[in-house]
Amino acid sequence: MKQYTPLIFSLGLCIASAVGYGYIFVDLQNNIGTLAVIKKEIQSVSVRDETAQSMTTLLSNIRTLKDGIQSYVVEDDGVVDTIELIEDVAQREGVTLSLSSVTAVEQDGWESHEGIEISFSASGSFTNMMGLVGSVEALPLASKVSKVSLEASTKGEWFGVFTMFFVKEKI
């Protein structure tokens, strides 16, 4: 029996090593699977973070653009100031201006803004009338001169009827 003892001991050690290796191999396979799942989750979180960061940048850019555009929109209580600005422009251009009407104009798809249409007449020299048109069109407003009708009256005086449209905030 003494001669079989080293063989039995070696065989037992070999079996114990095989069982230990098998356990380590199975545990390693489970850990590799867990690591693969964790890696996918990390990549998913990374993609979500990149998406969130790009969305934040986009929203910041949109906010900047909106603020820039908003600077051209007349505030709700600024209609009178805008009309006075047009009157000041007419006076600066040497034109006599008479306001005819101010009308709120609803626009399809506009929720927080509305159009304001101003009709006015003016008289002055042709050069001054053209100066008025150019100055009114150049106002820092979301506006347009939609109608202009000019006719010569007496002794170099011209008479004009104008319609101007601009955007204002809605209450």
Image: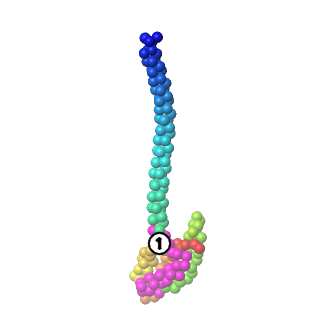
Question: Residue at label 1?
Answer: 71
Q: Secondary structure at mark 1?
A: loop
Give the percent coordinates (x, y) of residue 35: 47, 38
Farthest-out residue, bottom: 155
Q: Residue at x 45, y 58 (%)?
A: 57
Q: Is residue 50 visible?
A: yes
Residue 107, relative to residue 153: is it above or below? above
Q: Amino acid at mark 1?
A: Ser
- Which one is in front, 80 or 101? 80
Name the image quarter holding residue 109.
bottom right
Q: Residue at x 45, y 21 (%)?
A: 13
Residue 23, relative to residue 155: is it above or below? above
Position of the C terminus, as image quadrant, is bottom right
Give the percent coordinates (x, y) of residue 18: 47, 23
| Coloration mode | rainbow
- Left or right of 43, for residue 113: right
Q: Within 10 Å of the Cα at label 1, are there few (<14), some (14-19), or many (20+) other Cα atoms?
A: few
Q: Is residue 146 visible?
A: no
- Which one is in front, 155 or 43? 43
Give the percent coordinates (x, y) of residue 133: 44, 78
Farthest-out residue, left: 127
Magenta stretch: dominant secondary structure: helix
Q: Is residue 88 magenta?
A: yes
- Which one is in front, 131 or 114? 114
Give the percent coordinates (x, y) of residue 39: 47, 41
Residue 147, relative to residue 40: is it above or below? below
Total numbered labels = 1
Span shown in magenta? 68-96
Q: Residue at x 55, y 83 (%)?
A: 100
Q: Is residue 91 magenta?
A: yes
Q: Residue at x 43, y 80 (%)?
A: 132
